[in-house]
Every structure is written in structure tokens, then in C-alpha cells.
Image: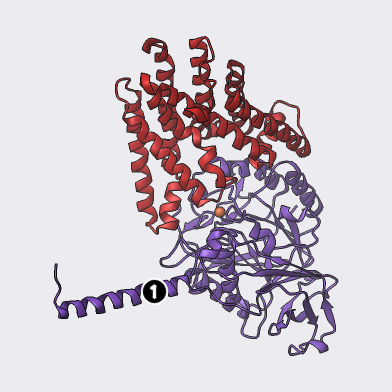
Chain colours: A red, B purple
Amino acid sequence: MNKTTLFEPLMFGRISIFIYVVGLYLSLNSGSVLGSVLFMDYGVPVDQSKQIEKTIAAIFLILGFISLMPKIWYGIPLVGIGAFILAYLTQDFGGGFFTKWSLISHSPRYLLPFGLVFLTFENTKKVGIQLFRVGVVLVFFIHGLESLQSHPYFAEYILNSFEYVGIPVHEDQALLMMKIIGGIDILVAALVLFSPSVFIYAWASFWVLITFVIRFLSFGWLMHKEVLLRWPNLVLPLILLSIMLIEGKKKNNESVFQT
Amino acid sequence: MILSNRQKKYSLIIVFLLAAGVSGAWAIYGAEIKDSGVKHLRVVFTEDPSSHAIVSWTSFSRTQENILYFDTVSRDAELSRYNFEQKEVRSGKITMTSMDKSEGVPEGFYNHAEINKLEAGKKYYFVVKSGDSVSKEHYFITGSRNSTSSKFLWGGDSRLGGEKPRYAGRTPHTDRQNMNKRMRILFESNPDIIALFHGADYGSTANWRHLYWWFEDHQLTTTKDNRILPLVISKGNHDEAIGFLENFWLGDISSENVNSYYYTTLLGEDAVIITLNTETIIGGKQKEWLIDELEKYRHSKRWVLVNYHRPAYPATKDFYDFTFARVRQTWTPIFDKYLVDLALESDGHVLKRTVPILEGKENKDGIVYIGEGGLGVPQRKVDPTLWFIQPPGMGGSTNHVHLISLTTEELKLQAIDENGKVVDEYSRQPRKL
Ligand SMILES: [Fe+2]
């Protein structure tokens, strides 16, 4: 693969990091887990912890802009490190549904930047592809598990979006759908792990897109922050799909453990 | 480097002192709290405080026999003299995580004795027995069945609070203890208080290292003459762990399953408090159930209040965050339709009282949302620009508990801080429906 063919996914990846960073900026600015940890766990006065949050939000935004510049790559892993720390804090602080698994469910947020750096260089691009694959596997596996365990938000997305389109469903039906969806998600994770294909990446991308749409249908425009933060969930399978299509053959079908 | 004898001697002394210091500190830090017998006595009311209660306690070894002895007169803990006993006690080992173990809290066992067919407005004296250990005699008073007035305490968010170490949630959590002492004083001076309705987030988690200390501190609410302040339980976002279900068992309630933590509490003739659960699906069955309850009670009761953890009108956290918007979108249109009399909200760690709100706008006939949690949790600051806490509403930043009284003439509430100062007051007349 030469650099010109890889240019498109790389640029899409950089733009996507920027999109994610905008979500992060909005989330940190309006008060996030970081402020809560500083205030509740470390006793930092509330104004000061808000200030720190806003400062870090601004730093992320600058890193996001830097990530857009095609020739500079070193801002990208810093976004990854930040995303990893936030996932860790979310898991550690708790207080949300399934936050005990945040390091896994948030993995695309840090694997996108880390993977993209590897993807940038010819001799490491295979590692990048495998990191993206790991991200897709983890995010589908863990959301599948959450769905099987009746994640209340997922149920509400189904209840509300079906009501929105005029076909209201009962809670039991929503929970049954979630069992099926959860099963499919885990199957998708397994297929990406053992036998990735254009079809499975297309499905994965399509499905993430659906989850964005039902968020908006369920709770309206204010879900934009939630969707921006989850943008990397869509980007990983899309980039893998585009690379496969560009290459025209399945080059990355070895197990992630073989890299 | 060659040391002189004198230097060697001093070095030895220093090494010895350091070793002693380190091992001493280790011993203090790592010391496991030794508990035996029974403690953490509590009384939980659910749907009908006039006839039903759950008496719960912690024991510290596995015992075959766990029994609640009770009577309507004091028997001075002489077991044979109690007229009633409940031998069917739901007992089990409290789940311990590795962090619970490293925090040094002792292994415990939960015990829940459910009692039905109690007489309304009656003193019940009781002792609990696990194995050979017998508690001191305590008592509680059941709710009234036909009284037209009722009084209760309400507050949420009792995790941590106090100087460092904050994170562990161990001692000191002086703010929570001070609030509990304040509640005891209020309970002693207002003996007609039925219970403490807790707006949830008891500890940082519902794991044993946090709940153990919550139960320790809860004992501070017991009056000097051993009257227990009954609890009405709701569930918050920090109460997810299995320890919550193990330790706050609700027994037989009419909601679909005991883990759903939503139910209606009858207060005398004239009032109901509907406890909702923001930590499960809030649409679907819970929403249908809420509508059913409001259909049933709105016209038959003078006062209908709702109590739940995550606020619809957060006074400090992001108003547009999905966590709160979901409550606003799902429940407030129902509150509006049935014109509930007061909404009790927790979670934010501030003190607030909104202007009356109807359909998302200020309206003199609307619903006032109070609370946000101050039973010892570190206090944040309200966003002073928010429209819904402008006068006649209010916002502040102080630990507090609400004393709420409902009579035929008015609903009256006071927010009281840990020093006993009234930091907010509000009253209103019943709705003419
Ligand atoms: Fe909370």
C-alpha cells in the first residue's frame, strides 16, 4: 500500500480525532468525571476543579487542532493518553451504569489515536490495523454484554425511538430485542476477531450509526455530546472497511494475537 | 565508608526507631476492626409504615439461629418475656471485594426480619439475636393509619464528607456523623417524625467498606432512649453494588421485583410519597406504574410527593446532560399532568428549591423541586444563573436535612444544616383539584 492510497483513511482518522475532541471539550466544559474525581476524591475546591477541567478541555481542543495537521503526528497519542486516563477515572469513580467496564467500552476513544499513529508509518501500519481491530472487538463485545444484561439506557433508547416512529413497544419486548442485539454484537466481535471481512466491517459501521440515530430519536439534539464522544466507535470499523476496500483484498485477516 | 563505633550505635538506634515506626504505622493502618455480636440495628419501612416493617442488623459470624423478639411493651431484653418473635430471618454473608478486605472492615452477615400486621401508631420494643449474641432493647413507632397530618425527615447523599482521607470513605466522615447527630436531635424534639426518607447515594459504593461505616454512623440517629429512626430506602447511582440489595432488603413489596426499588409509601390518611428509581429503566414498566399510582392517589390524597435520586432540575450539574434530561423527558410531563405537590431530588451535592415549574416553565401552579443532597457529602456550588433557582426559589451550598410536615392546611418544609440552623423554608396550601 503506498502513501497516496492510505491518505484518505488517515485524514478521516485525524478529522475524527478532532470530532471526538470537540465532544470531549464540551463534556469537560460542562462538568465531567474529572471534576468529580478532583472534588470528591482529592478534595480540590469545587471552583478550582472546574477551572482545571476547563483548562484541560482547552488543551484537548488545541491537541485536536494539531491532530488535523497532516505532517504533525505527536499531538495524536496525547489525545489517546488523555482518553485512556478519562476511561480509567470513569471506571474508578463509578456512579454510572456499567462504568465498571469503562476501560473496555471506551477503548475506541484511545485506540483510535494510538492506532492512527501506527497507521501513519509504513513499517508499523499493520500494528495500527490490529489496534483498530482490537477496538472493534472490545466495543462490540462489551456492548453486547451490557445489552444482554439489560442496560437501562439501551432499553430506553429502544422504547423512546420506537415510540417516536409511532410503533410503541413494551418493556419486555425491548428487553427481548436487547437479548438478540446483544447476541449479534458478540457474534460481530467474534467475527472481527477470527474472520474479518468487508461485510462485517460494513455491518459494524452501519450498526454504530444506528445507535447514534436512536440516541437522537430518543432524547433529541442534546445527545450530540454523547454521540461526539462515541464517534471513534464508528471510525474504527469504517477505516478498517475502507482499508480493505482500498487494498481490494483481505490483508488483515490474521489474528490480532499474531502481530 | 567506615563507621566509628559511635556512628554505628546511632545508626542502629535510627534503624530501630524507623523499623518500630514503620511497623507501628503498619499495625495501625492494617488493623482489622474486630466486631462480635450484633449491631447496625435498623428499621425499614416500605409501603405501609402503619403495619409493616423490616428489622435488619449485622452479625459477625455464621449462626444457625437469627431471631427478632418484639413486643408492644418493654421487656428489658429478657427474651422469654417477649410476646412475639420472628424466626424467619433472611440472612447471608455480605459480599466482600478485595478492597473491602484491604480496608480492614470485618466480615459481616446481613439479617432481615420482616414483620406484618403491626398495630398502627404503636411502640414496638425489640431485641435481635444471632447465635449467642443478643442486642440491647430498642424500639420504633409504627406510622398512623388515619392521621391527617404527618411529619418526616428527608435527605440524600451521605457519602464521605469531612477531612482527608476522603477516598477510602473510612473515618473520618465527620460531616455525615454531624448530620446524623443533627437528625437525632430533630427526631428527639419532633417525636412525631415517622422516618427518614433517604434520597440515596449512601456511600461511594454499596460495597461493605462503605456500607459498614454508613451503618456505624446511622446508629448516631438513634435517640437517647433507644428509639430507632426508621428508614425509607431509594436507590442512587452509587448504590449499584450487590451490597445494596444484600443490606437494604425491602421484603414483600408490590412492585414486580424486590430489586426494582420503587414503591409508594402511605403516610396516614392524607399523604403518599412515591419513591422512584432512576437507576433502572425509568420509562416502560416504571413509567406505567407511576401513572397507575398517580391515577390511584391524586384524587384520593391531599398530598402526593415524589422522591428519586437523579434530578430533573439539576442546580449544579449540566442541565442538558442526558442523565437529567432523561428524567425531565420521561417523568416530569407525568408529574405535570397529575400536579404532584413536591418533588424531592438528590445527587448534585447542593441545596436548592426551584420556582414552581409546569411544562418546563415557571408557573405559579407548578411543581417545586427541592433537595439535591446534603447528608454529609462535600458540597458543590449551585450555578447562580439558572432560571429555576431564582427567587422565590433558592440555591445554596450547605449540608442539610429537610424536615417536612403535611397537615390539612399546609405543606411546610425546613432545610436544616448540621448546626440546627434553618437554611431554607417553604410552605404551600393543598391544591384545589
Ligand atoms: Fe448521585
* Quadrant that contains the N terminus of chain A: top left
| A213 left or right of B255 in image | left
Q: On the image, which quarter does residue B69 sit in?
A: bottom right
In this view, B289 is above or below A67: below
> Nearest the camera: A104 or A124?
A124
> Which of the chains bears the disc numbered 1?
B
Whether label 1 lies within 8 Å of ligand 1 gets the answer no
Res. B63 in view: yes
> Nearest the camera: B143 or A78?
A78
Q: Amino acid at mark 1?
A: Ser
> Nearest the camera: B135 or A214?
B135
In this view, B402 is above or below A236: below
Residue at the image position 72 percent from the left and 83 percent from the top: B132
Q: x, y (%) of residue A259?
A: 47, 27
Q: Which residue is mark 1?
A: B23
Q: x, y (%) of residue A233?
A: 53, 29
The secondary element bearing badge 1 is classed as: helix
Q: x, y (%) of residue A74?
A: 31, 30
Residue at the image position 30 percent from the left and 74 percent from the top: B18
Q: Quadrant of ligand 1?
A: bottom right
In this view, A196 is above or below A54: above
Q: On the image, which quarter does residue B332 sit in?
A: top right
Dot 1 crowding, Cα within 10 Å, few <14, some 14–19, many 20+: few
